[in-house]
Image (spheres, rainbow, N blue to C red):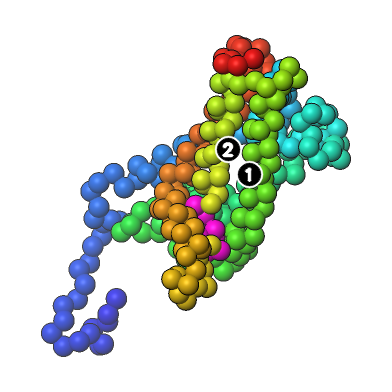
Amino acid sequence: MTSTATRPRGARARAAIAARTLRTDRWWFPPLITVVLLSAWLAYGTVRIFMHKWYWVAEYHYLTPFYSPCITDRCVPEASHFGQFLPGWWIIPDAALTLPLLLLFRLTCYYYRKAYYRSFWLSPPACAVPDGHQSYSGETRFPLLGQNAHRYFFYIAVLISLINTWDAVLAFHSPEGFGFGLGNLILVGNVTMLWAYTISCHSCRHIVGGRLKHFSKHPVRYKAWTGVSWLNVRHMQLAWITLGTLVVTDFYIMALAAGWFSDLRFIN
């Protein structure tokens, strides 16, 4: 605030407003919804990860992404693309090779940072609303210093998306030969959305079109950059959509593996 001693001549002093904010809309609603939905998703995911069952449907080669690839010695061999080199202790997730890295990719994502900064940390909860903390240090302290590693987690996320794609392809080849059912549609739909979310990442956009001075001299990269930019505008929507498709895919495969109902088959 400009003091009386340094205030330009003729300028008025700022109004002394006692209210926390002058906003009269429901500015608190989006952060609240974010807290509820993210907490519900984390609760579901945590329970499923440590259930250690109902993740593989041998009849159709369906594998839930929450357990891909399965690398503990209690895993079904067909679900272990890279071997079983971890002990089957309860505290170790069966997909311990991929889950922590995917979590770091999402935690450092530009959209998710905005989401949990505003909702869980209230930093700030909305525009024109004061920060929930007395001081502000940005991302200059541990553990937020690791946020800039997002570009490296992107490369790992691409590799994991390739694994998920391989799982979806394998699901078309059951022990009885080629087959096609509702589970295949769900797996393909999920991996398609995962690819869309991954390549809509801001880091991907920079990799595709960054450091170019003349787009006209690089028509292929410009075309790719245009496509990634179109997805990048929808990065927030894709972030939420993929959380939904992951839960739907996992729940459907869990239900089949548990015998709650049968897969709707179209071929074989």
Q: Is residue 235 left or right of residue 162?
A: left
Which residue position holds label 2? 191
Where does the image place residue 250, in percent across and percent down from the top left? Answer: 61, 28
Where does the image place residue 135, in percent across and percent down from the top left? Answer: 47, 66
Residue contact at pointers 1 and 2, CB within 8 angstroms:
yes
Where does the image place residue 168, in percent across and percent down from the top left? Answer: 64, 32
Q: Residue 116 got which mark?
A: none
Q: Is residue 189 magenta?
A: no
The image quadrant that residue 75 belongs to is: top right
Q: Nearer the viewer, residue 78 or 213?
A: 213
The span picked out in magenta is: 200-207
Q: Nearer the viewer, residue 7 or 158?
A: 158
Q: Quadrant of the C terminus?
A: top right
Seen at 31% across and 47% down, the residue is 27
Q: Is residue 252 left or right of residue 200?
A: right
Q: Quadrant of the N terminus?
A: bottom left
Which residue position holds label 1? 161
